[in-house]
Amino acid sequence: MAKRKLSHQQKRRIQKAQLSVNLDDDNTHQGLVISHHGGEVEIQPDTANISNIHCKLRTNLGVIVCGDQVYYREENNGLSIIAIRPRQNLLQRLDGFGQLKAVAANVTQLLICLSITPEPNLFLLDQYLLSAEQQHIDVVIVLNKIDLVDEQNSDPFDLKKIYQPMGYDVIHTSIIKNINIDALQKHCIDHINVISGVSGVGKSSITKAILPETEIPIGEISEVNQEGKHTTRTSRLYHLPLGGLLIDTPGVRGFNPVFDKNIPIASGFREINKLAQLCQFSNCKHTHEPKCAVTKALKLGEISQIRYDNYLKLLQESEK
């Protein structure tokens, strides 16, 4: 059953409850959320040389996810989380029932995992990118199972041709042949990373490869559609061997971004946003307006037709 959406009154009550907490109490400590299992949350204390602990949730705290920084203390019934520190961002998606679902907090980099098979869905990719741009999250595009294509094919699906000119890193990886796993590890240093993608692209296998000493469940691949089973049931945060953190999230077949209606969709498309500064009208939507720099660049082949079509589709969805 989908969770009930919080009312404005409930949100104010949560905020009031957190502001009333005495954070200067010697019995109050800080920690990082590692995972969330039902009514308990696994916490990594900020204090050095202390093992992870499990805390219960106070009421009126709101949703808590991996990456949250929290305050906790010893109470009559054990350790309890009493407040959440202000977040830098909250990565969210809409589930299959149209309900808002939080994925992770304080994320600094999104690893978007694609593969040779199943073939990448570029509209889904652009939805990830739009969500990341609105949250000010860096992105690395990972194309896995590169061993399945001829070595002469240096750019399957034109991902490097389309996305690298806009400043996105595109890394080709193979778990079987150990291709670019070290490069991916280096990209994760100094970041709180989230790795995400549809089932079957090797998300759990990549996680295991960059965390060789960690047990990561890997599911079988369906012979019918070459998609894997959802092996990651609960989000969990891991420390990477070369530095940085990784939040492994359950695979999603669709990632419908939560649009900020105060931000134009074009701002999530780097090449369109840059050209928009040259349009005649400041409110140009880049569809049919005169003297539009975007449609002009499209006719000249200076921007990707696929990207532009995906922009139009997301623009239409945002206006419903």
Image (cartoon, rainbow, N blue to C red):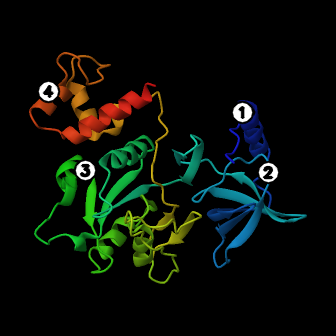
Q: Position of residue 263 (x, y in %)?
A: 42, 30
Residue under the image location 33 percent in, 69 percent down = 184
Q: Is residue 242 visible?
A: no
Circle nearer the N terminus (3, 2)? 2
Q: Which is closer to the viewer, label 2 or label 4?
A: 4
Q: Secondary structure at mark 3?
A: loop
Residue under the image location 26 percent in, 16 percent down = 281
Q: Which is closer to the viewer, label 4 or label 3?
A: 4
Spatial separation of the CA atoms under disc 2 and disc 4: 58 Å
Spatial separation of the CA atoms under disc 1 and disc 4: 45 Å
Q: Nearer the viewer, residue 48 or 43?
A: 43
The amino acid on which the numbered mark 4 sits, given as a three-letter code, is: Lys
Q: Which mark is residue 7?
A: 1
Q: Secondary structure at mark 4?
A: helix
State left or right for residue 159 relative to residue 258.
Answer: left
Q: On the image, which quarter does residue 269 sit in?
A: top left
**Residue denoted by label 2:** 22
Circle nearer the N terminus (1, 4)? 1
State left or right for residue 34 relative to residue 214.
Answer: right
The amino acid on which the numbered mark 1 sits, given as a three-letter code, is: Ser
Q: Nearer the viewer, residue 90 or 250?
A: 250
**Residue denoted by label 4:** 296
Spatial separation of the CA atoms under disc 3 and disc 2: 44 Å
State left or right for residue 302 relative to residue 208.
Answer: left
Q: Position of residue 157 (x, y in %)?
A: 21, 56
